[in-house]
Image: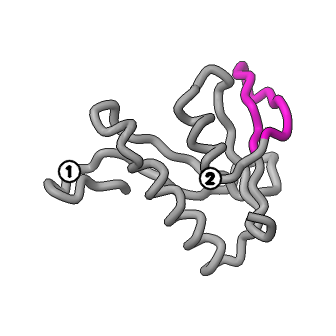
Amino acid sequence: TVLDKETGKVIGRAGVSMREGFDDPELGFVIAKGYQGKGLASEACKAVLAFANKEFEFTRFQALVHKDNVASLSLLSKLGFAYADEVQIRDEELQLYLLNKNNA
């Protein structure tokens, strides 16, 4: 859960989970519209990745994103993720991005 530091209000989430059919843990994140563009998703995702790397020894992560989600694509780039492939999940066409913490 991502909280506003001043008010304690829930403003989003960031975490790592395992998606059925994939081998790598997946980074997921969402920040409420009024709080986007302030670096909060970046701060939360960096902390989640560091925790998962240290505590669970995960060294490779994936993220799935719609190709038109410019903000998420920009964040993934800043975090060091690289485009890997196009994937189809149910009726959605998504882009798969990968991060190898051994090389980051």
Kindly indicate the quadrant of the structure image that contains residue 72.
top right
Q: Residue at x 14, y 54 (%)?
A: 7
Q: Position of residue 14 (x, y in %)?
A: 48, 53
* Quadrant into which the C terminus falls: bottom right
**Residues rendered magenta in the picture:** 83-97
Badge 2 marks a residue whose secondary structure is helix
Mark seen at residue 9: 1
Q: Residue at x 71, y 77 (%)?
A: 57
Separation of residues labelled 1 and 2 (CA atoms): 25 Å
* Residues at discs 1 and 2 in contact (Cβ within 8 Å): no
Q: Residue at x 72, y 70 (%)?
A: 58
Q: Is residue 86 left or right of residue 61?
A: right
Looking at the picture, which amino acid does disc 1 mark? Lys
Kindly indicate the quadrant of the structure image that contains residue 49.
bottom right
Classified by dominant secondary structure, the portion drawn in magenta counts as strand
Residue 18 on the magenta span: no
* Quadrant into which the N terminus falls: bottom left
User: 92 or 60: which is nearer to us?
Assistant: 60
Badge 1 marks a residue whose secondary structure is loop
Query: Mark 1 or mark 2, which is nearer to you?
Result: 2
What residue sits right under mark 2 in the picture?
79
Q: Is residue 101 left or right of residue 44?
A: right
User: 84 or 87: which is nearer to us?
Assistant: 84
Q: Is residue 41 left or right of residue 56?
A: left
Looking at the picture, which amino acid does disc 2 mark? Leu
